[in-house]
Amino acid sequence: MKFSLGLLVLLACGATFVVADQDYEGYRIYEVTPSNAEQASILHQLSAEGFDFIGQSRLLGQPSRVIVSPGQLDKFLQLVKDHKMIHSLFNSNLGASIAEEFVQLQMQRLMNPITGKGRLSNERYYSHEEIINYIDDLAQRYPKRVYVKTVGWSYEKRVLKTITITNGDGKFGKKLIFMDGGFHAREWISPAAVLYVIDQLVENFQENAYLLEDYDWVILPLVNADGYEHTQTGTLARMWRKTRQPYNYLGQTCYGADPNRNFDFHWNEEGASSNPCSDTYAGPNAFSEPEAVVVRDLMHSLSDRGIMYLTIHSYGNYLLYPWGWTSDLPDNWQDLDAVASTGAEAIKNATGTVYTYGSSTNVLYIAAGASDDYGYYAGFNVSITMELPGAGSIGFNPPVTRIEEFVTETWIGIRAMAEKLFELY
């Protein structure tokens, strides 16, 4: 289906949906594959200069994807030509892709409304309110096994809640897994995957009861509620990554910080920015973002029992562990590697999808102040970032017709990592 680049109006089932003018008109996505260390370094520098990399790897021969605005196009094409970089056009019209995605989102919400009761389908992406209503309903339907707690509020005063899932045996002090999703606003598949994990542990309890025998699971399904909701307000906001707290910079207002650069462990070192308008802005100080504070406080409150911290992102087919601020490895890196490799192997055996695993800096890129480093620092034996595969014309999110495929594949890896964790601890 093709859409014009002006105002898009969709009439469906008697309802009118309006998608605003495509502010990404003329934007493109290029795929660039570095073949030597110099080229990899150049790509990293482009990221620091404001090019939006939506999929980036420091491994030679592995492609990176970058959004190129009309104003950046000449510089980008000249650079890849001068340095003989392998590149190809992945998406020639990002604006049209975003418009089409919004039509699909609105259509699916119309055709698949939820009442706040019962299981969620995997046929669409859900709003923050719908996610909160769902976990609240689970707590009401399974009061002996499920507990929901308000753990804080976003900058714009959206409630942040955790769901604690047990087997209902009443035993206190069990070891636990702490999991979260939705750190970066535009990564819609992340909360969707986390919701599927919740579904499997609660609604599909009989099959997965062994995962709750000696461990409890504490899950924060959506960290960056403000940013996530902002990305669903219209096409201009679709690629938003950060939180929504405003900051003044050279007389202009720039919104948000990257919550995954806002943690007070090697804060604002390499891989983060001091520019409030940058997508990787670390904030004016560590823990300036209330959403990061919520995750920090949860980590410290759970670390005496916490064995694994798992955070779900998109995209890139990675299972990453500390450190992200240095190429050095933690003392128990073999355990981290064993858990990550087990997840990667399980997914490959089940679906053929290949995940790369290793420490964040050595496999992907240096990124100081991230939550996985802080989780390990706070006392979790194993701390892993899972970057789900990309799909569709934008990359971040599978089309709604493929959500089921992606979330079930993700669950296979998470379940296998949990099983390995039980062996080690």
Image: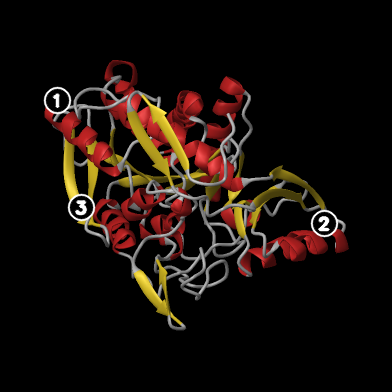
Q: Is the C-beta separation of discs 3 and 2 under 8 Å?
A: no
**According to the image, label 2 marks what residue?**
36
The label on residue 141 is 1
Q: Secondary structure at mark 3?
A: strand
Task: Report, in whole angstroms, how far the alpha carbon at label 3 lies from the one at label 2.
Answer: 46 Å
Residue type, numbered disc 2 = Asn
Q: Secondary structure at mark 1?
A: helix
Front in this rendered view, residue 364 or 236: 236
Residue type, numbered disc 3 = Val
Earlier along the polypeptide chain: callout 1 or callout 2? 2
Front in this rendered view, residue 18 or 80: 18
Residue 93 image offset from top left, x and y in percent: 64, 45
Q: Is residue 262 left or right of residue 339?
A: left
**According to the image, label 3 marks what residue?**
151
Determine the residue positioned at 54% across, 64% down. 325
Residue type, numbered disc 1 = Arg
Q: If the image is split into quadrants, where does the C terminus sit?
A: top left
Earlier along the polypeptide chain: callout 1 or callout 3? 1
Q: Residues within 10 Å of mark 3 (few under 14, many from 20)?
A: some
The label on residue 87 is none
Q: Is the C-beta separation of discs 1 and 3 under 8 Å?
A: no
Residue at the top extreme?
Answer: 206
Residue 366 in which image quadrant: bottom right
Residue 300 image offset from top left, x and y in percent: 28, 58
Q: Residues within 10 Å of mark 1 (few under 14, many from 20)?
A: some
Q: Residues within 10 Å of mark 2 (few under 14, many from 20)?
A: few
